[in-house]
Image (cartoon, grey):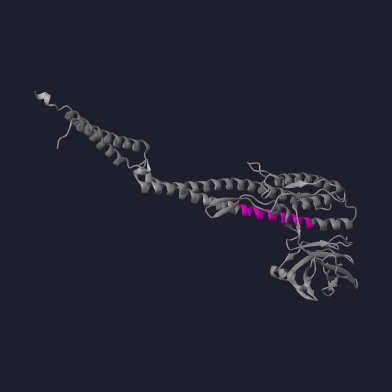
Amino acid sequence: MRISSNQLYDAGVRGMERNQSQLLKLQEQISSGRRILTPADDPIGAARALTVTQTREVAAQYARNQGAAADRLGLVDSQLGAATDLLQSVRERVIQAGNTILSDSDRQAVASELEARFAELLGIANSKNAEGDYLFAGHQGATTPFVLSAATSSAAPTSVSYFGDDGERLMQVGPAQQMPSSVAGSDLFMNIREGNGSFLAAAGGDGGTLANKGAGVIDGGSVLDPQKWQRALNSDFWQGSSNQALEIRFSSVAGSSHYQLFDVSTSPPPAAALPARSVSELLPFTSGQAIPLLSSAPAADFGAQVVINGLPADGDRFSVTPSGNKSVFQTMQELIGLLNSPLGSSQARTEFTSQLAGHLNHLDQAQANVSRVQASVGARLQALDGLSSNSAAVDILHQQSLSALQDLDYAQALSDFTRQQLSLEAAQKSFVTISGLSLFSYL
């Protein structure tokens, strides 16, 4: 076969260019540390690396969400801790104010301190995060959640209204997991169960509006059997009643104090109030004894009891009603009003002691509610810590997978580079030798 000079030159140039191209590719691989520079280098490996990269990026976004949720919940936890300390301080001052040896001015000084604590608690309730959103407004992050209304009259004092909602802002912290990063203020500060959480015991008849004349003081009461209490609430005992209530009425029989339980529930409006009905027999009373909430006609066991200390007067009454909801702000405002009231008589002091004990129960419920929410936030933070650790471990696995697919074997690459460099030098030298061959050199 005849080979022309042009063929020799073209073949030589192509060989050198091919060697140079392969040498350049090896040089780029060594400088970048990557085996796959283009999908053409390894189509299957490139496709797998793309899948792993996308999965890693999604996991990284979840990890960022976990960090953001942890930051927000950490701020919420800090504010809840401040609220707990504040309520504990208020409770201590209220217990101190319960000493009836204090003068009216002493109690008014405590009331002034509670006013400052009230403003502080309102500030905590309206605190914001770093983005400027209110922490306890639910989904309404841009709306001031707790607003103090102005007093329109002495009969209608200031009150705190809630303008947020009951929602919790969620963050996607995993492929199938969302984490609440906020707390609804309605659940934290507004919807707090009265009394002991199951029922409210108060001195006086008609829900505590009728003052007693004796020295009897009722405690907060206790539920001994929650199942019995719930069954009694749902039984026919109070069927058709909208405002369920029991009343303990005292009377003097033969010079000794006796009590009797009455059902004083009201029917749904516009019907008239249901007449009070006796649900127990007349029983002798001893100061400090536990009075079980039992009905004989009809038969019902509420699984609860109250204790009355002191000696009630003839005609005195004590009410027991299922707990409703009261805000911690209302409790503090009522406490301030109570401490500002002068105590000019023994009857006023007895009523003061009874009301103060009820407000202390409300404060205890508020503290317990804040502790419950704080425990929930702590559980979320703990879950986020676990998710963060898992995300870090998964990211390491992704890096290992990508390294196996993309990273360069330097020992093999350097060996290939040396071999390719030798091939290029051989091609260049052989081309010089062949291109120098000519018949005219021998003539």
Magenta highlight on residue 327? no
Question: In which quadrant of the rendered image does the N terminus lie?
Answer: top left
Residue 110 position, x and y percent, is 80, 47
Residue 152 position, x and y percent, is 86, 47
Total marks in image? 0
- In the rendered view, tell whether residue 197 sits above or below residue 137: below
Q: Is residue 304 visible?
A: yes
- In the rendered view, tell whether residue 439 sits above or below residue 297: above
Closer-to-camera residue (332/399): 399
Q: In this picture, which residue range is highlighted in magenta?
A: 357-377
In the rendered structure, the answer to whether residue 111 lies left or right of residue 184 reads right
Q: Is residue 303 visible?
A: no
Quarter occupied by residue 311: bottom right
Residue 35 position, x and y percent, is 35, 42
Main SS of residues in magenta: helix
In the rendered structure, the answer to whether residue 294 lies left or right of residue 413 reads right
Closer-to-camera residue (81/377): 377
Question: In which quadrant of the rendered image does the C terminus lie?
Answer: top left
Closer-to-camera residue (148/106): 148
- In the rendered view, tell whether residue 401 sits above or below residue 292: above
Magenta highlight on residue 373? yes
- In the rendered view, tell whether residue 24 sits above or below residue 134: above
Closer-to-camera residue (69/319): 69
Residue 61 position, x and y percent, is 52, 46
| Residue at the extreme left of the image, as rendered | 443
